[in-house]
């Protein structure tokens, strides 16, 4: 018995057998009644024993036919010999045929205790020369050449009999003269089937009786073999049960039998994805706790300071700082929730559908007009010449646009401009979303780091949380796209810097039905 590691416990107990027909490993539909699952042990046992039990009666029938054939062989040969011997006793007596049975011929025709023998000899004109008169005659069209023995089945006195018959040509009355037509005699020898049936039954008993011993033994051996063959599954089950809840290390697939090695490999893939998901959740919780700790501590300090203020002006100033800090904390919490929502939405393919990207982008830009006007920033949108549609997650794409526009407005000085541009790529298979601003720009050495979570450029003068571009990159990767930071083109008049963030997403065929509503 091979085990998966030293902690695996071995067991030989059979898998529990439950009635059922199909295996459905998909999540159950609560609206439909659940059907009981089918035991693998019971399924294999049924498919092995059911044909065996069904074929056994068929084998009995085939054995009976073979036994009958075996039993008929020697008895038919004896019957033909008797017919030949009886035919040699037919002679010509003048113009007629005669039958003279010798003692040796009578010994051949003597019946035994197990069956009855009948014979009949008819002359050329149908006269009875000897034997049983009511022995059935051959069919009229069955006349065969003389001297050839034929076999047929018949009935005599209500009993089935086997008959051997031949026609005997009488010699000519005058030597040297041709044989006259119509001078052949009919010789028939028949016997009952008791001896044949007794031999056939003896053969069947000799074949079937051992099967009554072999068949139960085969069932026991099949049961034992299946139990031993499925033991690795029990070992795998016990090993998984014995694991700690936090143990997500892969199973040792090389120790598994080849038949269940793919199952172990799939379990390892599942454990790997589960471990990755848990690590992401733990990292998210740690990052959220670390990032929220600072603004919450600042809020508490400012609140305590406000409680000690006596001057209305100082109190108003402290309350303003509390409002600004609470707004920053709320924005950080919203971004953390958006990041968590993005990671969870990536696991739900059903949430992806055909999205009219031009309408989605236009609505997103309209939502930021007031924020841009408050900072005296010129916010513009350059629409494509024709509608663009892609397969994606509407909420995630909207969150991506919000973070790109928010970042551009936040880092653009008063009086600057922000342009959102949507256009098809040159290859015709993807769409480009560009957000261009006249801010201070991002140094080339920092462009890879700004997509990391909670990373902020020193001296930028912004109160951002460092999550905006991290969320954008996460959404772009989920949509199998690409994001780069480039230099603005052409340079804006009167500026020497700026930032251009370009997102490339694969296009999807236009939907045949009406497009879904764009979230506003």
Image (cartoon, helix red, strand yellow):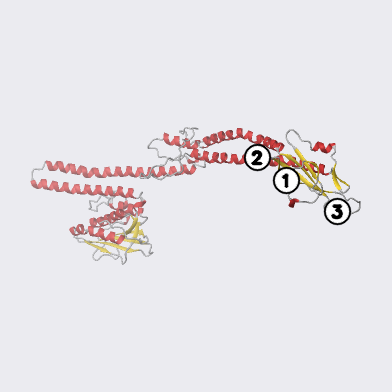
Image quadrant occupied by the C terminus: bottom left
Work out how far the residue at label 3 is from the one at label 1, CA to CA, in angstroms.
28 Å
Task: Please rate how many residues cluster around mark 3, counting C-alpha atoms within 10 Å: few if below 14, some from 14 to 19, many from 20.
Answer: few
First in sequence, mark 3 or 1: give its number.
Answer: 1
Task: Please state which of residues 294 and 356 is positioned toward the viewer in this rendering.
Answer: 356
Specify the farthest residue to the left: 311
Q: Which residue is mark 2?
A: 64
Q: Which residue is mark 1?
A: 152
Of labels 1 and 2, the one closer to you = 1
Q: Which mark is residue 35?
A: none
Q: Is residue 239 visible?
A: yes
Q: Which residue is mark 3?
A: 180
Secondary-structure class at tag 1: strand
Task: Tell me the quarter of the picture where residue 297 sits.
Answer: top left
How far from the left and from the top, in percent, is residue 44?
A: 52, 40
Relative to 319, is 236 above or below?
above
Specify the farthest residue to the right: 175
Secondary-structure class at tag 2: helix
Task: Please state which of residues 377 and 480 is positioned toward the viewer in this rendering.
Answer: 480
How far from the left and from the top, in percent, is residue 72?
A: 72, 41
How far from the left and from the top, in percent, is residue 483?
A: 34, 57
Task: Please state which of residues 459 and 424 is positioned toward the viewer in this rendering.
Answer: 424
* Residue at screen point 71% across, 44% down: 153
Give yes or no for contact between labels 2 and 3 (Cβ–Cβ under 8 Å).
no
Give yes or no for contact between labels 1 and 2 (Cβ–Cβ under 8 Å).
no
First in sequence, mark 2 or 3: give its number.
Answer: 2
Work out how far the residue at label 2 is from the one at label 3, CA to CA, in angstroms.
48 Å
């Amino acid at each position: 018995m091979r085990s998966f590691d030293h902690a695996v416990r071995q067991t030989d107990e059979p898998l529990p057998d439950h009635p059922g027909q199909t295996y459905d490993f998909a999540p159950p539909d609560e609206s439909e009644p659940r059907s009981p699952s089918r035991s693998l042990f019971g399924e294999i046992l049924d498919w092995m024993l059911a044909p065996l039990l069904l074929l056994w009666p068929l084998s009995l029938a085939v054995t009976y036919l073979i036994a009958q054939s075996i039993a008929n062989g020697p008895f038919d040969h004896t019957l033909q010999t008797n017919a030949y011997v009886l035919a040699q006793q037919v002679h010509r007596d003048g113009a007629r045929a005669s039958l003279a049975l010798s003692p040796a011929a009578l010994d051949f025709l003597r019946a035994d205790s197990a069956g009855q023998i009948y014979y009949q000899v008819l002359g050329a004109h149908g006269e009875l020369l000897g034997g049983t008169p009511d022995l059935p005659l051959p069919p009229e069209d069955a006349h065969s050449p003389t001297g050839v023995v034929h076999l047929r089945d018949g009935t005599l006195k209500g009993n089935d009999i086997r008959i051997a018959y031949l026609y005997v040509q009488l010699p000519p009355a005058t030597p040297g003269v041709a044989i006259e037509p119509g001078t052949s005699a009919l010789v028939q020898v028949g016997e009952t089937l008791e001896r044949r049936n007794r031999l056939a039954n003896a053969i069947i008993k000799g074949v079937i009786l051992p099967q009554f011993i072999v068949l139960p033994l085969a069932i026991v051996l099949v049961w034992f073999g299946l139990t031993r063959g499925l033991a690795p599954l029990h070992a795998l089950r016990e090993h998984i049960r014995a694991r700690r809840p936090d143990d997500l290390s892969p199973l040792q697939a090389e120790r598994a039998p080849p038949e269940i090695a793919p199952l172990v490999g799939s379990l390892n893939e599942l454990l790997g994805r589960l471990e990755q998901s848990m690590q992401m959740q733990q990292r998210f919780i740690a990052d959220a706790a670390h990032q929220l700790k600072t603004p919450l501590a600042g809020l508490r300090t400012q609140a305590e300071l406000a409680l000690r203020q006596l001057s209305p002006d100082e109190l108003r100033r402290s309350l303003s700082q509390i409002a600004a800090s609470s707004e920053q904390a709320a924005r950080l919490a919203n971004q953390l929730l958006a990041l968590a929502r993005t990671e969870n939405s990536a696991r739900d393919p059903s949430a992806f559908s055909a999205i009219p990207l031009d309408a989605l982008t236009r609505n997103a830009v309209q939502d930021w007009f007031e924020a841009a006007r408050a900072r005296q920033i010129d916010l513009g949108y350059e629409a494509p010449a024709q509608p663009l549609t892609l397969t994606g997650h509407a909420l995630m794409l909207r969150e991506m646009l919000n973070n790109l526009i928010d970042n551009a407005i936040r880092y653009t000085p008063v009086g600057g401009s922000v342009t959102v541009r949507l256009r098809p790529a040159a290859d015709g298979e993807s769409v480009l979303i560009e957000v261009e601003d006249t801010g201070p720009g991002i140094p080339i050495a920092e462009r890879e780091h700004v997509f990391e979570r909670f990373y902020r450029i020193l001296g930028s003068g912004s109160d951002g949380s460092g999550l905006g571009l991290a969320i954008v990159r996460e959404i772009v990767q989920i949509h199998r796209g690409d994001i780069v930071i480039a230099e603005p083109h052409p340079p804006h008049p009167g500026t020497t810097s700026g930032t251009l963030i370009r997102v490339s997403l694969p296009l999807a065929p236009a939907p045949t039905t009406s497009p879904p509503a764009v979230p506003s």
